[in-house]
Amino acid sequence: GDQPTVSRELLERLSVALHESNQAYLGGLMRQAEGLQKDARDNIKIELEKALNNVVDLQLQNCIGDVEAGGSIDKDAKPLSAAFREVIDSQHDADSNQAAIS
């Protein structure tokens, strides 16, 4: 049917953007830990990276689930999923228009 599907390319771009954002955030956190011993800093960085990556993966899964479930998405409650849906809908509309033209 007309159910929006999540394209792999879009998912990869979103994943990269979220991971880049996390790296910038992690850099800021690690600057605050500069006074700690190197081993402690390295361990903190490893654990924070794992936690942030898990959050990104969970957000992506939630976005996919929300979009594929159909129906409306509350922008206030789920801003990332709502934005994701808008991109997919606009991509779907562009594909439909392209198909109608050809």
Image (cartoon, grey):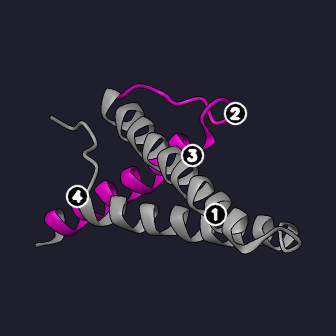
Residue drawn at x 87%, y 67% is: 32
Distance from disc 4 to disc 3, alpha carbons, whole Å, reads 24 Å
Residue drawn at x 54%, y 41% is: 82
Residue type for callout 2 = Asp
The residue tagged 4 is 96
**Residue 80 numbered tag:** 3
**Residue 97 numbered tag:** none
> On the picture, is 32 further left or further right than 37?
right
Quadrant where the C terminus lies?
bottom left
- Mark 3 neighbour density, 10 Å: few (under 14) some (14–19) many (20 or more): some
* First to last magenta residue range: 70-99
| Contact, mark 1 vs mark 2 (Cβ under 8 Å) | no
| Observer able to see residue 53 | yes
Q: Could you tell which of marks 2 and 4 lies nearer the N-terminus?
A: 2
Q: Could you tell which of marks 1 and 2 lies nearer the N-terminus?
A: 1
Residue drawn at x 34%, y 65% is: 12
The residue tagged 1 is 45
Q: Can you say whether 4 is above or below 35 in the image?
A: above
Residue type for callout 4 = Ser
* Local SS, label 3: helix
Residue type for callout 3 = Leu
> On the picture, is 4 further left or further right than 21?
left
Residue type for callout 1 = Lys
The location of residue 75, given as percent across then percent down, is 63, 36
The residue tagged 2 is 76
Distance from disc 2 to disc 4, alpha carbons, whole Å, reads 29 Å
Distance from disc 1 to disc 3, alpha carbons, whole Å, reads 26 Å
Distance from disc 1 to disc 2, alpha carbons, whole Å, reads 31 Å
